[in-house]
Amino acid sequence: MFSSIGRRAISEGMNRLFPETGARAWQRMLSGRRLDLLNPSPLDIEIEDIAHGLARVARWNGQTTGDHAFSVAEHCLLVETIAGTLSPDLDRCFRLAALIHDAPEYVIGDLISPFKAALALDYKSFENKLLAAIHIRFGLPAELPADITKLIKRADNFAAYYEATALAGFSVVAGS
């Protein structure tokens, strides 16, 4: 899919963004790719693996109403829809960024925010490194412009509120 020049440019770009740690933590994907979670390469990321993984990861640790868990894939679709509604002229590439905003969860799962904060390692840095590789793989900047990041976060918060009150049993009254 990529030329040798393209492969070298991607590899050099990722090494500049995130120098290799020397450690390796591989996961084999259904596509046959081996993704190094500590030093992810855009060359090892396939949209089919992301879609498959996100469709099987439950939001809210599965604690939602209904016959089936509400998946991260469904959440991503909701966030992209909300982002497009909030910003009707949003460029297609940034709608894609909204759609794949939680893509790292296809291999690392959907950890709830309080648990992420309790982890000893810098989870956000780890997650951002994988997201940067995913962005590069799909032609997006490794780091999105601040206004786009803010818009996606706003849409993500709207989606989380809807999910919490409509699916996860939270009431609209604060603290319940």
Image (cartoon, helix red, strand yellow):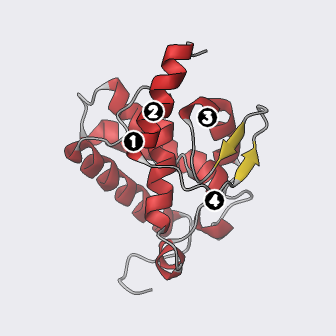
Query: Which residue in the structure is indicated by mark 2?
Result: 12
Q: Which residue is under mark 4?
A: 109
Question: Closer to the camera, 59 or 44?
Answer: 44
Q: Earlier in the sequence, mark 1 or mark 3?
A: 1
The amino acid marked with disc number 2 is: Glu
Q: Can you tell which of label 3 and label 2 is closer to the viewer?
A: 2
Instruction: Say what amino acid the circle numbered 3 marks.
Output: Ile
Going by the numbered disc 1, the residue's amino acid type is Arg
Residue 112, how many percent across, how many down? 54, 71
N-term mark: 1 or 4:
1
Whether residue 99 is visible to the viewer of this picture, yes or no, is no
Which residue in the protein does label 3 denote?
A: 45
Q: Amino acid at mark 4?
A: Gly
The numbered disc on residue 16 is 1
Check the image and report above or below for 2 versus 137.
above
Q: Quadrant of residue 32?
A: top right
| Relative depth, front residue between 172 and 7 | 7
